[in-house]
Amino acid sequence: MTLATILQQRSGEVIQATPETPVRSVVQLFADHRIGAVPVVQDGQVVGIMSERDVIYSLARDGAAILEWPVERVMTQPAITVESSLSPLTGLSLMTRRRIRHLPVVDDGRMVGFISIGDLVKARIDMIESEAEAMRAYIAS
């Protein structure tokens, strides 16, 4: 299984922001869609990630004025990205090492998806359950 497999099971576009999007608008996206991060994309290229953590740290440091700032002043950059050929387990390992919860999936310089740690944990659990069922079937036969 690869990240491409996980992305194929989804429908709809990835919610994203541009560097010029006001922080307030991204906070509203977080609330409306019940998400914790968005990729920041310019001309099809991922230039950063805006997360709830970015908002919290900026609010603590600079106050409520940040809500009017463009995302590019608050986002994490450069974004750590991965290719769709990556395995979910490798993605989980990267997220754990780098202490991040979201990864833009980029092939040939273009974003093809956005993966959360929850997506990868679910994929891993599904794989383990499938392997266990195959083992039970083998033992029973």
Image (cartoon, grey):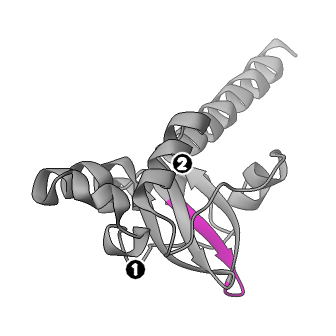
Q: Which residue is mark 1?
A: 78
As drawn, 102 above or below 41: above
Residue closest to the eye, 136 or 82 = 82
Query: Amino acid type of disc 2?
Result: Ser
Which part of the image, by quadrant, shows the C terminus?
A: top right
Residue drawn at x 11%, y 58% is 61
Residue 101 position, x and y percent, is 42, 50
Residue 11 position, x and y percent, is 84, 46
Residue closest to the eye, 82 or 29 = 29
As drawn, 42 above or below 113: below
Task: Classify mark 2: residues with Cα within 10 Å, few (<14), some (14-19) or many (20+).
Answer: some
Residue closest to the eye, 107 or 77 = 77
Q: Which residues are magenta?
A: 103-109
Per the rendering, the mark at residue 97 is none
Query: Amino acid type of disc 1?
Result: Pro
**Callout 2: helix, strand or loop?**
strand
Q: Quadrant of residue 114?
A: bottom right
Per the rendering, the mark at residue 116 is 2
As drawn, 82 above or below 58: below
Residue drawn at x 61%, y 61% is 16
Residue 107 position, x and y percent, is 71, 79
Residue 92 position, x and y percent, is 47, 52
| Residue 77 appears left or right of 40 | left
| Extreme residue in the top direction | 140
Assess whether residue 89 is covered by the magenta stretch. Answer: no
| Residue 13 in sight from this viewpoint | yes
**Callout 1: helix, strand or loop?**
loop
Residue drawn at x 65%, y 75% is 106
Disc 1 versus disc 2: nearer the observer = 1
